[in-house]
Image: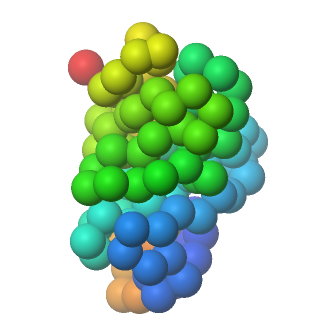
Amino acid sequence: MAFVRVCSEDEVAPGEALRTESAAGPVALFNVDGEFFAIEDTCSHGQWSLSDGYLTGDQIECTLHMAKFCVRTGKACSLPATKAVKVFPVQRQGCDVLIDFEDGHFAA
């Protein structure tokens, strides 16, 4: 695992997202009440940025067609999306938030 520093935790307020670029493609980092989660930043249905969506609890709603995904698991929660997006391991070191871009995977 190769964790890379993405930001400090105060750069992403609770209920907000941050888009970051990686060799794996764009990744969205979400702050859910102080817990951080990272998923692919592209909706599996409409090829749209998820970091621009509406975060309610642990679900992000895509602004293109209103598909929802769980930011914890990457699983599609509502139509029209039926395919999950990849999740990436997140780690905190002090005030820094790190993502392992090499270990993106689909939840079991």
Which residue is at a point 31% across and 64% down the rendered structure image? 32
Image coords of residue 12 (percent x, y): 50, 76
Residue 75 seen in the figure: yes
- The residue under the point 54% across, 83% down is 11
Q: Reply above or below: 51 against 61.
A: below
| Nearer-the-camera pick, 56 or 99 | 56
Image quarter hosting the C terminus:
top left
Quadrant of the rendered structure where residue 31 is?
bottom left
Residue 25, by quadrant, is: top right
Q: Nearer the viewer, residue 27 or 63?
A: 63
Can residue 40 be seen at all in this image of the molecule?
Answer: no
Q: What is the x, y in percent for residue 98?
A: 49, 66
Give the number of marks: 0
When the figure is inspected, residue 75 is found, relative to residue 52, above or below; the finding is above
In the image, is 75 to the left or to the right of 21?
left
Asked if 98 appears above or below 85 in the picture, the reply is: below
- In the image, taking residue 25 as reference, residue 31 lies left or right, namely left
- 79 shown above or below 34: above
Residue depicted at x 62% and y 53%:
52
- x and y, in percent, of residue 87 in the image: 43, 38
Which quadrant of the view contains residue 9? bottom left
Left or right of 81 on screen, residue 70: left
Q: Residue at x 36, y 87 (%)?
A: 94
Picture colour scheme: rainbow
